[in-house]
Amino acid sequence: MIICFFSSAIICEIYKYYFLKQDNMATDANKKEIILIQPPIPKSIRKDYISVQFPLGLGYIAKSLSLCEVNVTINDFVVEQYNTNRFIEQLKRIKPVLIGFTALTCSIPFVHLISKHIKRHNPQTITVLGGAHASALPLETLRELPCIDFIVVGEGEIIIKELYQESVGSQNYHKVKGIAFREKDTGALFMAPGRELIENLDNINFHTFGLFDVEKYCRAHVSRGFSRKELSIMELLTSRGCPESCIFCAGHISYGRTLRFRSIENIISAIEKNNGVKKIEHISIEDDTFTFNRKLVLELGNYLKSKNITWNCNARIGTIDEDLATTMSQNNCRKISFGIESGSERILRLIKKNITIPQIINTFKFVRRVKIRYVEGNFMLGSHPDEKLEDIKMTEKLIFKLQPDFLTLTVMCPFPGTEVYEIMNNASLLAKRKNWLNFNLVTSKLPYKRLYNLSADELLYWRNWLLKKYYTSPAYIFRQIFRVRNIKELKYLLRLAKSVVKNNGAASLCKKAARK
């Protein structure tokens, strides 16, 4: 009797495992396929300098589409080599009904290339492009990219679901807000009314580790000081929107100027789910505006400390005081990154940064006092077209006064949709026909030949010269050596030093221009 009972139970389990699994596989096989793509970035961007992070935007879109019961594949060609033949094989194998891109300005030419392959081999596949560039120039982008069917303007999670539903339904795309598209019959371009911002961010599902091949994201740091080679790291966005008006920033194009935050319960739930998949040791909070919400900083910090998780974040000068910095340090915050841009009060006013040099100096002093492990300073040369050599010298002076643990020094890029883009366009400083490959912050070639007072060669020279001077200065080297806490930090700093020397060895490229 007992033997019969166990035999029946075993047979039952075999049936459930084999036959029900086959049913589920059949169901999955019948689902429509969607591919989401992050295109490659130009080779001119020096790879050792960029952060390697999960494409969070595509993660949110994938989670949103999962509610439509489709199979979603993410191709991140920033971390994996794009191969045309392999991609065409993928198209033929899974026959996607929709392919969505998110693209930086410098990746627009790659969208053009890949979308041509899509239409050549799968002409019925719907192609969609989103991101700040496409949102800033929707009709122009459609004209430039004849193989892109739809542009998503702004936040894409709701729009992409509606586009998919219309593509398998009535195909009445005119009723979808927040898109631009090419009429199928006439080829005429159509711009729909704008889409309202998503008020409750808790309604947007967080990404999970399962969406990405973590091993592919170990090439470089996630945020300076923290690499997946040493730590299990989760990236986190707790908010959208920024109320500030910096003339060079393109963040408002996709997310607006209304600041919206997720609830602490929603954030903790996402962390717990990911922690169940892969033990999290460190969280990189990627919000530009995290310290605007003091209550959230304290609540999330308390939670992370209770879980023995370290973290880093960005903070705006003026939104953090010594009391808050002290509590952040006590709650396992290991790094704060500040956007400073310039050491010139004149330039800070022109770029509408809304901070002062005394504020910057005071903030760095008290953040160091409370023993935050790393303090990062982000600076930008040429952040306003009227920048002069004396302004750059003021920036150099401030950099060496602040002595940041990590110095990020870029040259201004006038991204479409920003105020500085309009200033430079109106002043005929930008070519009528833009080479989008050069529109990025770490390029070796700028998208303009000069500003009012300085040439592009001069700006690039001063960037390279300042970076090399700072990172090879004895004061910086000895300070970092004496502050190393463990072997992981030492390994990371040695790799950083190697990349700085490698990438700035040719800093004398524009010596002649710099002598002017």
Image: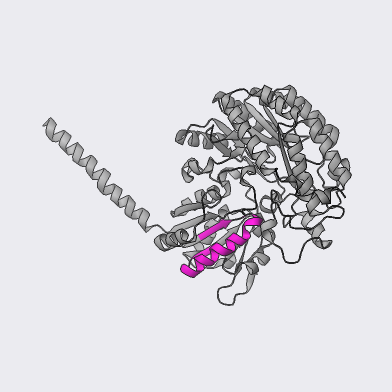
Q: Position of residue 483 (x, y in %)?
A: 67, 23
- Above or below for 145 versus 67: below
- Above or below for 459 versus 223: below
Q: Nearer the viewer, residue 511 or 249?
A: 511
Side (left or right) of 279 relative to 426: left
Kindly indicate the quadrant of the structure image that contains residue 222: top right
Q: Residue at 81% of width from left, 28% of height from top? A: 362
Q: Residue at 33% of width from left, 50% of height from top? A: 24
Q: Position of residue 441 (x, y in %)?
A: 70, 49
Does the magenta segment cover residue 125? yes
Kindly indicate the quadrant of the structure image that contains residue 54: top right
Does the magenta segment cover residue 158? no
Q: Position of residue 163 (x, y in %)?
A: 54, 61
Q: Residue furthest bottom?
A: 186
Q: Which residues are magenta?
A: 99-127
The total number of labels drawn is 0
Side (left or right) of 466 relative to 440: right
Q: Position of residue 127 (x, y in %)?
A: 54, 63
Q: Is residue 478 visible?
A: yes
